[in-house]
Image (cartoon, helix red, strand yellow):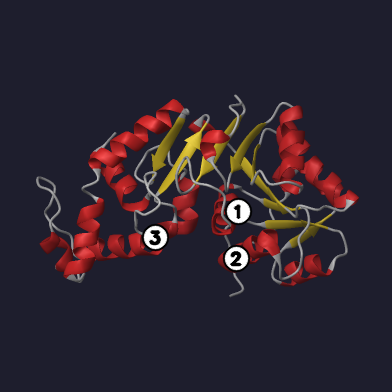
Amino acid sequence: MRAVDRGFLMLCSHLGNPERDPLTTSQLRTLFDRAAQHPQETEDRLLEVSDLTSLGYSHVQAQRIISLLEDDWLLDRYLRQAQKYSCQPLCRSSRQYPSVLLDRLGADAPGCLWIKGDPALLSTPMISLVGSRDLRPDNQHFALMVGYEAARQGYTLVSGNARGADRTAQDACLQAGGRVISIVADSLHLQPSHRRITYVSEDGFNCPFSSIRALSRNRIIHCLGSRTFVAQSAQNHGGSWDGTVKNLRAGWSPVFCFQDGSESTRALAQMGANVIAEDALQDLKALHGAQIKWF
């Protein structure tokens, strides 16, 4: 592993220690912004506190960053544990890191993704599916057809592995011989190995479920797909609504909502989502849609 990749991991991961205080995505972005504005000649030596204070950090803040970068032994132990579970890190500096996340999120892209499965799936044509856990029958069938058509038309399906829309679409895609990228909000290492599924986690390979992680992963789901399909959402409530609204505000990917006549679908349409019937899924490539930033 390259030194820059190790640096990313030490800066932005708990490395199995819940009491460790890594940089948040926002703090990592600030560090990169300051370093880009004031480049330092540190290639042939270790980073020092004085390098960081010259970028505007206080001595305490600089020492925190240096301390994170000194946890080599903790990183090595964590990597050995990950290997036992067939998990591997993809740092933002890695060639295999999905470029679409960098293009759409910029410095807000996760510093590291943890992978269980084939990372090559992250460079295939992808579409994304989100939706509620408790689905109405027509909405459930829409989710199923998104998964089926993804497989039939050669797309990898990206979803969140939750009960309801996610698993309905994922199961349909796999049953049709397709490929799935599942962005999980619970422990990556406990996911069952499958040759056509790549599981992805943002914070580490053994982090437990949390509602914060569940909401955070939505931006990855929406950004990876060339199109995002919404099987069902609850207006002003839940991860499907929250992630879709953020997508529409930022313009990450064109959004296509199932034409179910609901208040939530009408509200998303007013924000720029495209409303489609199920038969529109027969030609996914023809669905270009609007990509509107309204906020």
Which mark's residue is nearer the viewer, 3 or 2? 3
Assess whether mark 2 and mark 1 are in contact (beta carbons under 8 angstroms): yes
Q: CA distance from mark 3 to mark 2?
A: 19 Å
User: Which badge, 1 or 3, comes first in the chain's sequence?
Assistant: 3
* Mark number displayed over residue 279: none
Assess whether mark 3 and mark 1 are in contact (beta carbons under 8 angstroms): no
Q: CA distance from mark 1 to mark 3?
A: 20 Å
Q: Which residue is mark 2?
A: 246
User: Where is residue 263 shown, x and y percent of the image?
Assistant: 83, 70
In the figure, is residue 50 to the left or right of 75? Answer: left
In the rendered image, which quarter is residue 94 located in? top left
Is residue 175 visible to the viewer in this orientation of the structure?
yes
Which mark's residue is nearer the viewer, 1 or 3? 3
Q: Which is nearer the eye, 122 or 291?
A: 122
In the figure, is residue 24 to the left or right of 290? Answer: left
User: Where is residue 140 shown, x and y percent of the image?
Assistant: 83, 47
Callout 2: SS: helix
Callout 1: SS: helix
Q: Which is nearer the eye, 171 or 128?
A: 171
Q: Which residue is mark 3?
A: 24
Q: Who's the residue at 51% across and 44% down the image?
A: 201
What's under tag 3, amino acid-wise?
Thr
In the rendered image, which quarter is residue 91 located in? top left
In the picture, which quadrant includes the C terminus?
A: bottom right
Callout 3: SS: loop
